[in-house]
Image (cartoon, helix red, strand yellow):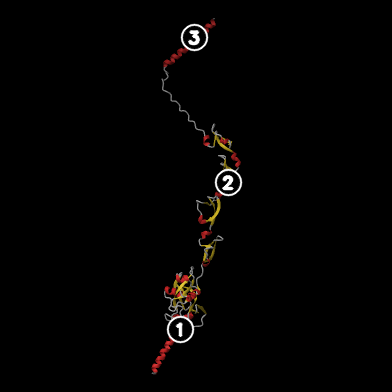
Amino acid sequence: MDKVKKFGIAISLGIAIIGGVWLASPSKAAKCSDFNVVACGTHSQGDLKAAYARPHVKSLYNYSGITDGMINNGTNMKRGTVDANGNIIVDGQVVATGARTYQAKAGTRQVSPEKTVNYGGYNYYQYTTGQSFIDGTTIYEIYAWFDNYGKFIAGVIKDCGNPVWGQATWKAKDIKVCDLTSKKIVTIKENEYDSKKHSKDLEDCKETKVCDLDSNTIITIKEKQFDSKKHSKDLTDCQKTRVCELKTGKIITIKEKEYDEKKHSRNEDDCDKAEVCRISDKQTVTVTRKELNNSQYTTDMSKCKETPVTPPTPETPTPGELPKTGTANIVMSALGLGGLTTAIIAYVASRRQM
């Protein structure tokens, strides 16, 4: 009997020791435990959503930084682990240190909790993970949530549904943005970005003055809005001036850069006269604008160009009888001349005798 009693006492002590360990180590407890925020854990997202539907669990999760979107939509959620050293690890990187957690019951072998909160009539006790994971397993799988910049926010331990958080190791990066108010490129922390105040497109800060070709006014636009069909970077394209067009005697408006002193005059009084072509003698003359209405003048200066006269084509002589130049003709000419000379001498002699 003594042996049986001793054996019974040994079994009782063993059960007591196991029970003590179970009570003192909530995260090492059986699958379902009243030390757990969610008695049987949250091993799936379905379990997580079901637990979050309980008002007291939702309040505790919200207090720990977990929101509706994180639970219901899985926004920026990843899988990771938390260990007794207070490290929260995701994708092989320590994303937070000094981890804390809440459990639903204080263990008899645990130190006094750092904090106690109550939601919906339920008390929850805050411990470091080192104080919570006091026996057996010292690392647990978690759901981990991050903000849009990759900064760790909070997590939930799968085995017990206890929320967990810590000091995020993430550091905001410096980024260059366009300050939409000052139109200057500035450097800010990534988490300070505000789409109402900043633009990540640095071209939004690059502005230029152009001539708007439709309105003929100088305007300021973003560099990326420049359209060569609508704008000109040559601001003189927007500078217009009234001049006297010397050829027509009319006052016209031209671009400043089109001014030509040979064609224009800035003195509008010069448009009282104009150079024209006088049709009658094709001479270039200067007349008043009133005279210009007379039909004997025209502004078409091509009318004053002399039409070149084509010289007449010389007539080709008709072939005739060739002149006679033989010996007989020469003798006859000599005889004729001798006879005429003799007659003249005889006449003179007769006159002397008389």
Near-viewer residue (302 or 70): 70
- Residue 189 % position (x, y): 53, 67
* Label 1 crowd bin: few (<14), some (14–19), many (20+), radius 10 Å: many
Mark toward the viewer: 3 or 1? 1
In the picture shown, does residue 12 fall above or below 220? below
Q: Amino acid at mark 1?
A: Leu
- Residue 63 % position (x, y): 51, 74
* Label 2 crowd bin: few (<14), some (14–19), many (20+), radius 10 Å: some
Label 2 secondary element: strand
Mark before the other along the chain sequence, 3 or 1:
1
In the picture shown, does residue 182 fall above or below 27? above
- Residue drawn at x 53%, y 55% as measured from the top left: 221
Label 3 secondary element: helix
Which of the image's four quarters has the C terminus? top right
Q: CA distance from mark 2 to mark 3?
A: 100 Å
- Residue 57 % position (x, y): 47, 76
Residue 87, can we see it?
no
Q: Which mark is residue 50?
A: none
Mark toward the viewer: 2 or 3? 2
Judging by the rendered image, the residue that carries numbered circle 1 is: 23
Judging by the rendered image, the residue that carries numbered circle 2 is: 241
Query: How many numbered marks, from 0 up?
Result: 3
Answer whether labels 2 and 1 touch (C-beta < 8 Å). Answer: no
Q: Amino acid at mark 2?
A: Thr
- Residue 222 % position (x, y): 52, 56
Mark before the other along the chain sequence, 2 or 3:
2
Q: CA distance from mark 3 to mark 1?
A: 187 Å
Near-viewer residue (28 or 338): 28
Judging by the rendered image, the residue that carries numbered circle 3 is: 343
Residue 347, can we see it?
yes
Q: CA distance from mark 2 to mark 1?
A: 96 Å
